[in-house]
Image (tube, rainbow, N blue to C red):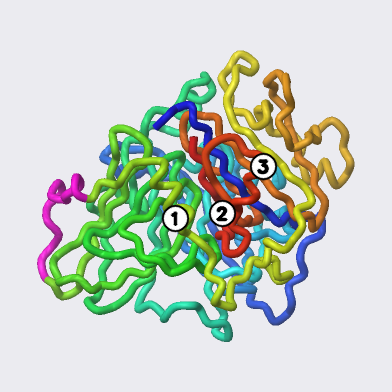
Amino acid sequence: MDAERLATILAAILVLLGSSQCYTAGAENRHVFLDWEVSYAVRSPLGVAKRVIAINGRLPGPMLNLTTNDVAHVNVVNTLDEPFLLTWNGLQMRRNSWNDGVAGTNCAIPPGENWTYVFQAKDEVGSFFYRPSLGLHAAAGGHGPIRVNNRPVVAVPFDQPDGEFDVLIGDWYNMDVKEMKGYLDRGRDLPSPDGILINGLGPYAADFTFKPGRTYRLRVSNVGTRTSLSFRIQGHKLQLVEAEGTYTLQKHYASLDVHPGQSLSVLVAADQPPRPSYYMVVSSLFIKPELFGVGNVLYAGSGGRPPPPGDAPLEDLSSHNGYDRSMEQARTVRMNLTCGAARPNPQGSFRYGRINVTRTILLRNGDAEVGGRRRCTVNGVSFADAATPLKLADHFDVAGVFAVVSGRPERRRQPSLGTAVIDARYRDFVQIVFENRLPSLQTWHLDGYSFFVAGMGWGKWSPDARLKYNLIDAIYRSTVQVQH
């Protein structure tokens, strides 16, 4: 791979800016009330004890199981010794950014106190997850699955599966989160992770039981810190049907790349000759040495137990570890236009190719020496959290809390530390271009919204790139990878 090649990924985003006014939920909508306690626990998934963050004593935490139009009331009690926030990765927070759970819009929950998140799963059906959003809490766990199910009156574009499994995969560091933060505070890169977990468990510990002849839906999310992963099941095809709330063209894959923060659903048919176990394999992408997480797919009634650890033919299941292959696969993930459910929004913007773009924003990520430390930057600015949440400062017109920037890299700008905000108008249709100048893949996530991934490719972006946009059936999701 030529290190001088610069990857650009292009995403057209319909921006419906959150106002200070919350939604109004109709009386006919179901309300779901949950109490979650956030606490420390000790786990040893890779044989080394580590202090983790558990929800109601569990890691992964409890499932948030909703149906479209449900209103969730999640009371989060923080028993940690530091502030805490949860964010709802992939759920759209239309005009309700107060409950998004990130530092710019929410005050952190202080130790010993609680906060009740209230939000509606509106006009979306699919697979998502929740996770901590402050510091590096996500590297200590605190995550769990979210399902948003369809209402019975709206059919899904595939036969009802015989069962469902949530599969949370991610990289894992044995070192404590405070030690990890120390690396970054000193301007150093994190070392390679120590391994890959499946549902919080180490090698060969996660079991999934299939009945022969049945079909199962697996809701897969990459909840890790930084590592892109390849997901596959030995001897089985993966039929992709949904990604972060959008039904997809139903293609079959031998393996699927899942980048940090991404979610997808696959259908898997238990159509292979019964035997004690087939291996579910999750391997790292773009790092050396390659890491593996291995689970067991058990065929009910086949008898016996899986072979002992170490017998998985990992060398045969190893992924094709290349950026070009990964990008080509990403281009095949497209929206299913034949179904009538889970449209991107009720205004009909799934016909996004006919909407005039009102503004183009270019975000170029890199790194620089700022204040004596190596820091990540966007358009030359390394973000610093403000003492006052940005939504409050904006609502009450508090001066000096943040600086509104143009949304374009400025020539000859010296790298700086600041609280930079890009302003936009309510109901604008905005094109955002991400350029990655770092030597590793980056993922970008838009909290509370989703976007159409209209194009991706190598090199610097120019307006001519629009000629190659997918303006018909681009995938609509909240997290996208930008390769180096």
- Residue 248 visible (yes or no): yes
x, y (%) of residue 460?
A: 60, 35
x, y (%) of residue 76?
A: 59, 55
Sequence-wise, which precedes: disc 2 or disc 3? 2
Residue density around tag 3, few if under 14, some if 14–19, many if 20 or more, within 10 Å: many
230 is higher (above) or lower (below) than 209: above
Q: Secondary structure at mark 1?
A: strand
Residue drawn at (58%, 86%) of the image: 153
Per the rendered image, the range of residues in magenta is 303-316
Residue drawn at (38%, 32%) of the image: 175
Q: Which residue is mark 2?
A: 89
Sequence-wise, which precedes: disc 2 or disc 1? 2
Disc number for residue 103: 3
Q: Which residue is mark 1?
A: 221
Name the magenta segment's main secondary structure: loop
286 is higher (above) or lower (below) than 475: above
State the separation of the CA atoms marked 1 and 3.
23 Å
x, y (%) of residue 34?
A: 57, 65
Magenta segment includes 135: no
Question: Circles 2 and 1: CB distance less than 8 Å?
Answer: yes
Question: Circles 1 and 3: CB distance less than 8 Å?
Answer: no
